[in-house]
Image: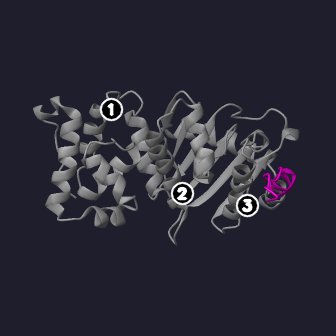
Amino acid sequence: MGSKRVVTSRSQEPRRRFREELRRLRDERGDSLRKLGEALGWDWSLLGKMERGQTLGSADVVQALDHYYGTPGFLLALWELAIGDTSQFKEQFRNFMALEAEATSIHMYAPSILPGLLQTREYARRLFELGGVFETGEIDEQVEARTSRRDLLAGEDAPHFRAIIDEAALRRPLLDAAAWREQLEYIVKASAQLHVAVQVLPFSAGLCELSNTEAWFLRLPDGRTVAWLETGFTGELIQESAGVEQLQRGYDRLRDHALSPRESAEFVQRVLEEAPCPNVDPT
């Protein structure tokens, strides 16, 4: 891995500097856009648009480029300058993303929306629209970034993933019947994998711990566990052991109230069967 780079005074034109660095680094590697796209698992045409300044891409793809080129944090810093708003991408979140990529197990609780690692493209798209992202190109990039995270659960070295999903998230459907059925079918399919466990927290459990907080617990290769808490407006990375242990106790009690993985699969299947079928044109 190369040494960490610094942002020089040429960053006074951050958008231009960002795309120039993307092209320079690729030229130094001697990669074509297609080869780079294959190496990263991203659409090569998106990478080309980033180099031409037609789009800035997302934090996820820029982090992947930093890792590939061995420039930790350099391209991300330029990207943050280019979008003109660093407040949304705090150091804590970047640390969480890096830790998630190396975690040996991921346990989480979703109180109101389905977990990002289990979202289909249409579900993610609707969430970004509701969050105020309206430009088609920007939405496409954000959706790609969100759904590409599902790659964490693929392959022989995939971490064990447990998601406790509040019934509320399963009872608030997409208005597009076909898209909602696709989303439910994806959860059923994902939960059938040996390293994935999905549990439903039913309404009958009453008010429980972590009632309004999305919580993630990452077990790391060195034996540590860290936690990430998100309310929809803010997020916080918890690494201090006492704080993590307290949160884990709450998560364990929450899990005690949830349905078993088998019961949960049957629950999601019933929700799927109750979901309206998309209108079919008889012609």
Labelled pair 3, 2 in contact (Cβ < 8 Å): no
Q: Nearer the viewer, residue 254 or 151?
A: 151
Residue at numbered disc 3: 188
Circle 1 SS class? helix
In this view, the residue farthest toward the front is 283
Q: On the rendered image, what quadrant is the C terminus found in?
A: bottom right
Q: Position of residue 20 (x, y in %)?
A: 17, 45
Specify start and end residues of the magenta stretch as a single range. Answer: 268-283
Identity, as a three-letter code, of the amino acid under mark 3? Val
Q: Which residue is mark 2?
A: 150
Indicate the secondary structure of the residue bearing disc 3. helix
Q: What separation in Å lies between label 3 and label 2 (alpha carbons)? A: 15 Å
| Residue in the image at 68% along x and 43% along y | 251
Nearer-N-terminus badge (3/1) = 1
Residue 193, image x and y in percent? 66, 68
Name the amino acid type tagged 2: Arg
Query: Sequence-wise, which precedes: disc 2 or disc 1?
Result: 1
Horizontal side of 129 relative to 183 (left or right) equals: left
Image quarter in which the N terminus is found: bottom left
Q: Which residue is mark 1?
A: 83
| 191 and 276: which is toward the camera | 276
Residue 225 visible from this viewpoint: no
Position of residue 187 in the picture relative to residue 263 (left or right): left
Three-letter code for the amino acid on which mark 1 is drawn: Ile
